[in-house]
Image (tube, helix red, strand yellow):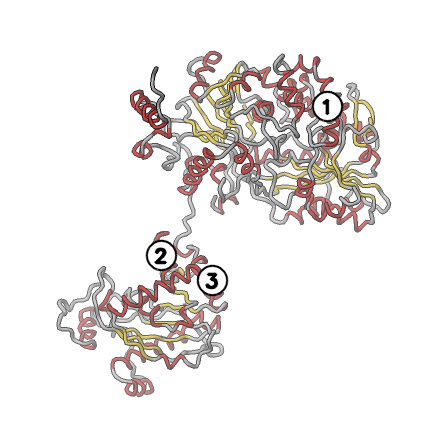
Amino acid sequence: MPQNQRKHPRPGLVLDVDRTSPPILFHHGEGFRMEKLPAGRSRVIYPAEPLPGIPNPNASIRHALENPLGDSPPLSALLKSGMKLTIAFDDISLPLPPMRKPDIRQRIIEAVLDIAAAAGVDDVHLIAALALHRRMTEQELRHAVGDRVYDAFAPSGAIYNHDAEDPDGMIVIGTTPHGEEVQINKRAAESDLIVYVNINLVSMDGGWKSTATGLSGYTALRHHHNPQTMVESKSFMDQENSELHKSNWRQGKVLKESGIQVFQIETTVNNNTFGYEGPLAMLQKREWEWTFKDRMSFLGMQAGLKRMSPASKRKSFQGWHSPYEITSVQAGEVEAVHKMTTENVYKQHLVQVEGQTDILTMGLPYICPYNVNSVMNPILVACLGLGYFFNMYKGKPLVRRGGVVIMTHPTPWEFHPVHHPSYIDFFERVLSETTDPAVMSQKYEKSFAEDDWYRHLYRTSYAYHGVHPFYMWYWCAHALDHLSEIVIVGGNQEAVRRMGFRSATTLQDAFEIASDSVGFSPTITHYHSPPILMADVT
Amino acid sequence: MARKLTKREIQRKTREIYKAVGNAPQRMRSISNIKSAQFPYRAARTPNGVPPVKRKTYLGSEYPTVWARRLPARTVRLLSTELIAKPLMSYIASPQRTGYDRLEGLKKRQAVIFVANHQSHADTPLLLTSIPFQWRNRLIVGAAADYFFKTKFGGSLSALFIGAIPVERNKVSRESSDQIASLIKRGWSFMVFPEGGRSPDGWGQPFRAGAAYLSIKCDAPIVPIHLSGTGKILRKGKVWPKRSSTKVTFGTPIWPGEKENSRTYSKKIEQAVAELADEENNDWWIAKKRKHSGQTPTLQAPDMGSWRKAWSLEAQLEKSAKTKSRWPTI
């Protein structure tokens, strides 16, 4: 992208497809498809170009810490000698793909620790706020917080992963007026100050969801991570209309009233997922703007990917670190901070779209929040498409009620045995019996959540919690409730059928399948992502 | 029982079936089909109603030449100068080189600005093969940004084989002069034709002040050079070179004085080249006497009509029996 466009990035675009429109890029796991969409009734939504990053991130972080938002005093005034300080930070699921060094968390944590050192704070703990996600490995922690911080705190055991199943490490603070229990990491609760370091990749992240979810456990999460809440969150990316967020905010209020002091630091990044230059640069360009070099790199990449094994493809894609630039840093009181953060996220992601569509198509990439350095199993494919991409709207869903979603992904019947052990049983035992989130919630959730073996793996290995695959399926609840048909193109037929979806070999076949629900001349919208976009549907 | 087909036979039969059905998968398509294929094999059209993106070309004065000063490119340049340009020039131009003794006073690693009159495309290779190795090894050549760097291909060839660096000749560009100045300060010598282009009629053109400015800015000496005879080889308007004998005369290095003005300094440089021309046309002693009496002929034509300019230039130069046309190409 030329320099002048980086300074003046173009907003998102809705392209009406005509006969001259080129084939459109669809992500397809660790590969890509070029698909021609029907002329005259299709449109493609392109994300906005990356906003310019702040020129001096370290100075901006310092400024944010000393000029907090809301009624919070500056961080230096909150830090005192002899106090207990807990710094919690977002886990491996953010940002996606992981960002190039230095990670934002490293920059912020170093700035916070610098002020803490000046204030004479000795008792500092750093906790990866991963809720029921898998523990981060040493390498992943080092990437997130940097070697300096890790080497300073790891020997004394002061940097560690949150353990939501530690009976001595969790505490229930209280209950919301809606009867939702509020549970939090004991060390954090007993601290004089929690500094939460957040990365807001999408508008769902941040706010009270950081503390009330990230440092919490099953006892509290089950109150909002359930089918009922997810169906009523329209969407969970739009906080004002999200039951998930309302529940989190209620829990946050209880935390606040119990005297727990949180100094929230939130950051936003731009859409520079694949870089302005480099081997993947074409993926964040519009097809007609691909240069000769882009086209040749793409063809070369396609030829190479055809010859690579799935494992080597996965390894090479998972090795990509995005050159994200920081677009804003806010610090201070949770709600005031989050309000501004959300505005900044919307500045990058929102694209105005007029009206709904009959068929929504989406190319699913190789990564979602739960398969970093891991395998994208079928449940995560469903979660990425129907949970994340489908919910990337404000106002109305992109696809009308009773419409069809067509996703492209290889959807292999493959699971990471270390990271996703409970997913294997969920796929074999639960999905073979029911795909209804409400039924599985009542019948199976508790047994998976309280299974000792899954607990053990979660606590000591690098496994997602036993209940996590249920949550992934609940994430799809709104889409499952809204849509009449879901088709996966190019996926493993058995894996797709197990999830209750339809399988198609080509996009044309998928349109044929969809015609049962939406007729022979449906309107089609393609969600051209990543980089991330959020449709503001009017 | 049917015979089991070999792998090759299966492939051939599959191809035949696909051909008959007309629904070949992409890997089966022939090259001609690939040629007729659309995006991404060929660029996509900008859709109707979408403003086309303005591409930055990085041509002209913005052409990046850093790569051409790295060791691999310098090695290629050295080899091409020694193995191609030198034999070629000695065949076409039969150069007679004089005045090297005047450069002896310069230090070994002294960055120098070489300045010469310009009549032909042969001037650059002739100078590149004439400049002593100690400067040629780290030498950049000022080349017209609007001519040599008009296309990527031309720009890269110029940068690779002659070490060209783009110079704006139609507008004042601080960027290119700053870049050249920083290179001179880092020990790179610079060769430039201050006339700004080849002579249109065989007479010289006024020197521009760029070289003088750089000399003052970098406190680098200027070595004046006079080239004669190259006008017959590949003068302006000619496409095919013609053999001719040439002379390359190096002058005494000129250092900028204190508080030197680039305009008067440029005149001084032009005068030095004119003296070399006089020396070459007559002899050293006559040229010296004319210099001191202020009668050195200028490089430029006297103020007169174009035919008289051509006439008097012809009178100055050696008569050639083979000359077919005495009228200049303008």
Identify the residue position indicated by label 2 in the image.
B157
Tag 3 subunit = B
Q: Tag 2: Cα neighbours inside 10 Å, few (<14), some, or many (≥20)?
A: some
Identify the residue position indicated by label 1 in the image.
A247
- The quarter holding residue A163 reads top right
Residue type at tag 3: Gln
Disc 3 is placed on an element classified as: helix
C-alpha distance separating marks 3 and 2: 20 Å
- Tell me: A253 left or right of B218: right
Tag 2 subunit = B
Q: Position of residue A116 (x, y in %)?
A: 79, 47
Disc 2 is placed on an element classified as: helix
Identify the residue position indicated by label 3 in the image.
B179
Disc 1 is placed on an element classified as: helix
**A397 w.r.t. B95: above or below:** above
Q: Position of residue A104 (x, y in %)?
A: 65, 43
Residue type at tag 2: Leu
